Amino acid sequence: MENLFSFAIMNKLKKLRKALVLVFASIFPLTLLAQSEKPSSSTFSIESRISNFAQRGYDLKVFYYPASSRMSYGISLTGQGLGYLGKRLVFSGENLEDINIRVTWVASLLARYYFASDYRGFFAEFSGGVEEFKATYQNITVRDVNGFLSLSAGYLWFPFKRDNFYVMPKASINFLVFRPEIRHIGPAAYRLRVAHPNPSLTIGWKF
């Protein structure tokens, strides 16, 4: 049994390594295409998805903006609960309303390409990471870890004259790199969908 468990862990780590290689291989060509005369100095920003807090969650992202580039690169740590609609979007299965499902944590790397040199307006984003889902029913708990790649499109709106505070709606599609098999807990049977939408609303501050 221990050998089988070790084999499963090693197999997941190999898949995760391939996913991270794909993330960096995709980001590098974008970096070469994103050279620009503006801005002349590097900066950074912090942001948070307010939609996560509405779902009993948390979210923190930090982005670095290199000088003379339309790219920014970020790291993210997030988590949230899933309501009825969220469960149906992310999972397929039966009796999902009878169990509680929570995204315990999501750790990811992100890269954004801005279509305007001043960062205002539309952008495209590519990200990849690892996340843990926790399902509970009475005193039973099931935890699963999976990897994902995500493609996004969003809009950066600075409502004030100074380009500091911003509001950012974003629509994403997550593609699972590896996912657990069908899980059974209490009256429910469920499995992560191969792909699912992930809309969000974020506020941030660019320094």
Image: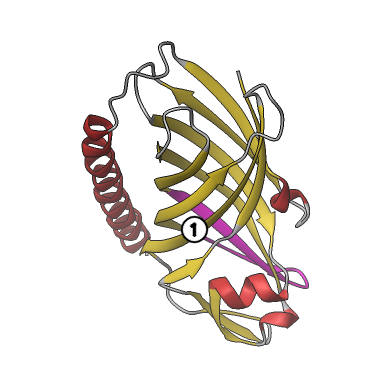
Type of residue at label 1? Ser
Above or below 74: residue 55: below
> Which residue does the image show at 40% across and 55% down from the upper left?
151
> Which residue does the image show at 27% across and 32% down from the upper left?
31
Q: Which residue is mark 1?
A: 172
Give coordinates of residue 29: x percent, y percent. 21, 38
Camera-side residue of 98 and 110? 110
Left-right relation of 180 to 168: left
Give coordinates of residue 2: x percent, y percent. 37, 58
Left-right relation of 125 to 206: left
Above or below 142: residue 63: above
Q: Main SS type for the magenta part?
A: strand
> Which residue does the image show at 43% across and 39% down from the upper left?
109
Give coordinates of residue 23: x percent, y percent. 30, 44
User: Which image quarter is the N terminus in?
Assistant: bottom left
- Label 1: how many Cα within 10 Å (few below 14, some 14–19, many 20+): some
Above or below 192: residue 204: above
What span is in magenta? Answer: 129-144
